[in-house]
Image: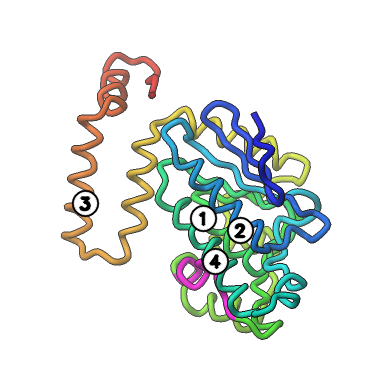
Amino acid sequence: MTDSSYEAITLSHAGPVAQITLNRPDAANGMNDTMTRELADAARRCDAAGTKAVVLTGSGRFFCAGGDLKSFATAESRGRYIKGVADDLHRAISTFARMDAVLITAVNGTAAGAGFSIAVTGDLVLAAESASFTMAYTKVGLSPDGSSSYYLPRLVGLRRAQELMLSNRTLSAAEAHEWGLVTEVVPDAELAERATALAQQVAAGSAGSNGAVKALLLSSFKNSLEEQMEAEGRLIAERADSADGREGVDAFLAKRRAEFA
């Protein structure tokens, strides 16, 4: 089922799997105020009990070339306009990070600027062999957004984050995989099929367990050892009392496949 109410993205559902497609191919899927507002709304709608995996990809040759500079340039107040675009993008990313559903980003082409930023926010990141990654912000006198200053130092370390942001080095899909930014590189023609298969695999699992994993990893850099272990203890106890937790343990003991909600 595809939602037809959006202009700059598409949102479709097939059972517990949702797919969001950035859909401004003539503008290299550049992010304007319409796209980020719709992306935040789609993220909100995916943060629901019936959705267990979300695939985020782009239409055409680009995943996303970053902010739509033409729309920035024609705004009455560039700063106010860009802040609004960034706020909506950040609202989407915050929802993706905290929802139980697993976010799979399927990077089908160039990911630049905010496109790079949102690509690596995926819980699982697939990249086509032809995909490339570049920050590009300082090329146009801007600074990073889309959570990249949070995620990149954690994913690749401070030195490599500095290199990416200050030199605008472009990484191939293979290099991005080597650096730890990408989970898996697949042939271009197989990207969509692989993303669907991975989403279905994830959707067969427990949404609550996946959400707990996401929550624990998100808190792991700010908590002390004891705080993190307490969070682990509370969450595993909560999962043990849940319907999925009971089903998982009972299925294992009965040597059958678990049927999660």
Which of the marked residues, 4 or 1, is nearer the chain's N terminus?
Answer: 1
Which of the marked residues, 2 or 4, is nearer the chain's N terminus?
Answer: 2
Kind of element beneath mark 1: helix
Kind of element beneath mark 4: loop
**Number of the front mark, 4 or 1:** 1
Residue 168: percent from left, percent from top: 67, 78
Residue where numbered disc 4 is placed:
146
**Number of the front mark, 2 or 3:** 2
Cα distance, mark 4 to mark 3? 27 Å
Residue where numbered disc 2 is placed:
36
Pick whichever, 58 or 126, lies toward us: 58
Please report the residue visible at 18 percent of the width from the left and 38 percent of the height from the top.
Answer: 237
Colour scheme used in the picture?
rainbow
Which of the marked residues, 2 or 3, is nearer the chain's N terminus?
Answer: 2
Rendered view: 168 above or below 102: below
* Residue 144 magenta-highlighted: yes
